Image: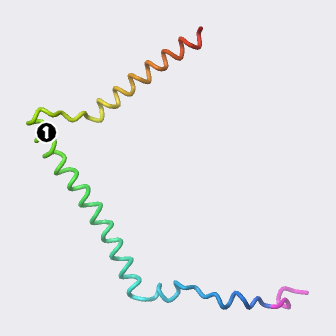
Amino acid sequence: MSLCDLPQIKFLKRFKNPFKNQKKSRAFWLFIGVIFISIVFGFLAGTLSNTLFYSQIRDYLEKLNINLPSVIEKVEKEEEKIIKVEKEEEKIIKV
């Protein structure tokens, strides 16, 4: 018996793709376009506000004698802690 002689499965035909008509519709593509544009403008607005407002806030806080720690200082402190822990581990292993 060949594959062509086998009976066809009919129960799969009643399940239609619900997105088939939406892909062709104009409203669907308009919706996708609006989402894409909002993502792009949201990213640009976040980047712009971060660069502009962070420098202004930092200057204002420096006038009030409040210093924000930089990322480099935080990383250096963490590295010092890691080095101390590694030295202590070596001492424990040697004992």
94 lies above or below 61: above
In the image, 81: left or right of 6? left
Q: Which residues are magenta?
A: 1-7
Task: Tell me which residue sits at (29%, 35%) in the image.
Answer: 71
In the image, 48: left or right of 23? left
Please tell me how crowded label 1 is: few (under 14), some (14-19), or many (20+) other residues with Cα within 10 Å: few
Task: Tell me which residue sits at (34%, 26%) in the image.
Answer: 77
Query: Quadrant of the image for the N terminus?
Result: bottom right
Q: Quadrant of residue 8?
A: bottom right
In the image, 11: left or right of 32? right
5 lies above or below 42: below
Task: Tell me which residue sits at (70%, 87%) in the image.
Answer: 12
Furthest-left residue in this view: 63
Q: Quadrant of residue 93?
A: top right
In the image, 44: left or right of 87? left
What element does badge 1 sit on? Answer: helix
Furthest-top residue in this view: 95
Q: Front-most of 2 and 18?
A: 18
**Disc 1 marks which amino acid?**
Leu
Q: Which residue is mark 1?
A: 61
Q: Is 68 colored magenta in this rendering?
A: no
Q: Quadrant of residue 55?
A: top left
37 lies above or below 50: below
Query: Quadrant of the image for the C terminus?
Result: top right
Q: Residue 9: image x %, image y %?
A: 76, 88
Q: Residue 34: image x %, image y %?
A: 33, 76
What colour scheme has been applied to the protein in the rendered image? rainbow
Task: Tell me which residue sits at (84%, 89%) in the image.
Answer: 6
Q: Front-most of 77 and 43?
A: 77
60 lies above or below 28: above
Q: Residue 50: image x %, image y %?
A: 22, 51
Q: Front-most of 81 and 8?
A: 81
